[in-house]
Amino acid sequence: MPRGAKGRPGNAAALGAALRALPSVDALLGALAGHGALRGIPRRRLTEAVREALAVERRRLLETGGAEPANAEALAGRIVAQLSQRGVFSLAPVVNATGVVLHTNLGRALLSPLAQERLGLAAAAYTNLEMDLARKERGSRYAHVDGLLRRLTGAAASLVVNNNAAAVLLALESLARGKEVIVSRGELIEIGGEFRIPDIMRRSGAVLREVGTTNRTHLKDYANAIGPETALILKVHTSNYRVVGFTAAVSSRELAELGRAQGVPVMEDLGSGCLVDLTRYGFPHEPTVPEVVAAGVDLVSFSGDKLLGGPQSGIVVGRAALVDTLAHNPLNRALRIDKLTVAALEATLYAYEAGNAIETIPTLRMLTEPLGSIRRRARRLLRLLPAGAQRALGAEVVEARSQVGGGALPTVELPTAALALGTAALPAEALDTRLRAGRPAVLGRLLDDRLLLDFRTVLPADVATLAQVLTALA
């Protein structure tokens, strides 16, 4: 006897009748056939949703003893609402109104128009990815970006893998397996998703040799640690945090000189990595890849999809003999990039070589966009909202602060303009929930009982769509 309705015996008959009244899978599929909101949904997915909806309804009836069973029309409505919200494809565009330019959970760097064009061409056709057309024999997929990377960084050689953590893993496994790698305690960072430098080192087979303290490490600490088992000195840029106050760190140049004197290669993991100096746009100085290469560091690794503004990738540049060792490690095949990454990365690097990276690469354009331009975009959206919608949403343009994101420049906050929303009738948290459930989903940030839509990361092409979404919401 079901216990969901306090175990009353009279409920058994009602429960049985309610369960028998549920429509069959075929009947529900028939009721949904031809529904416009389900256009493009494969029948297999639709059948699964129907079975799931029926299972949920059966559980509800068992728990309630058969109270108020849903009819076919109600069940069909639930299925349509559920599948319409999910959409045909899981990966979907999102309006990023968080103000975080390199938002890891939203895919980090946007690709430039040229990179999108080149990616599309490579996707739709056979390519010379690993074909030397002049000699009609196998070539190298890395050749398409190697010259660009060498010219832009000043390094003798380059290699590209699928992300920067992979680049560090490959270097450690290739150069220091079973040997010691010297790292400052202040640089044993966690890079997100609970992946930590010591963990990567253990996976590579290298032995960690910590030197210095959390806040202060000196050149003599490195020098005293060098011994017969030392294979590498690793310097890690603390991309996602800063230690301030009573601190000391050893420069790239000092470490490179120590390494040369002792015959130990030096590698620097720059994390985000940048090819241009952003200080002229008001940013604090960050070591660029060319600067670190010029300092004499043997290997430099950095991400392709952060400050560089390209596709996800891990780039290694440096001494030719060391890069060649990495390239010939069998592990490199498991980490190698495909033709789509090559196409997008080549186009991204081309923008730096052509001298128009700031204007054409979305990441750099957003980071350097003047406050006045952002404010005009926010006010444009406000003008697109009907007066009634403005009042209902409590919409107003306010000053705020944006972040770089992606573990890059963690102490930098950028002045921005945001649309603040939220009233007693339409609270900020409720608006946030409803905007995230829409198509397209809109992500803002909650601050002081207001929902802020930061226009540093709201693209010009998103303004009209966002205005429609907000008007409908109001």
Image: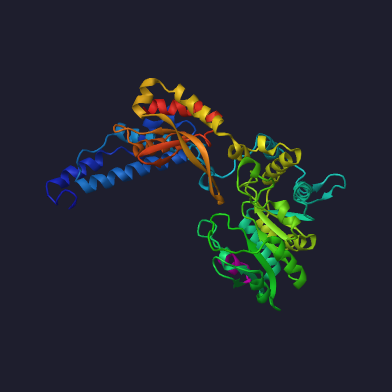
Residue positioned 75% across, 38% down in the render: 354
> Magenta stretch: residue 200 in it?
yes
Which image quarter holds the C terminus?
Answer: top left
In this orientation, does residue 78 appear?
yes
In this orientation, does residue 92 appear?
no
Residue positioned 77% across, 71% down in the render: 261
Q: As rendered, which of 401 and 458 lies closer to the eye?
A: 401
**Percent x, y for residue 309?**
63, 43
> Magenta stretch: residue 227 in it?
no
Question: In the orientation shown, which residue stands out farthest toward the top?
Answer: 387
Task: Determine whether 251 is above or below 415 in the image.
Answer: below
Specify the segment rendered in magenta: 197-207
**Percent x, y for residue 183?**
62, 68
Question: In the orientation shown, which residue stands out farthest toward the front?
Answer: 246
Question: In the orientation shown, which residue stands out farthest toward the right?
Answer: 135
Q: As rendered, which of 294 and 304 lies closer to the eye?
A: 294
What colour scheme has been applied to the protein in the rendered image?
A: rainbow
Task: Determine whether 33 is above or below 180 in the image.
Answer: above
Residue positioned 36% across, 29% down in the render: 394
Classified by dominant secondary structure, the portion drawn in magenta counts as helix
Q: Is residue 241 left or right of residue 120?
A: left
**Percent x, y for residue 282?**
60, 42
Could you say which quadrant of the image residue 334 lies in? bottom right
**Percent x, y for residue 77?**
34, 33
Task: Determine whether 416 is above or below 223 in the image.
Answer: above
Count of marks placed on residues: 0
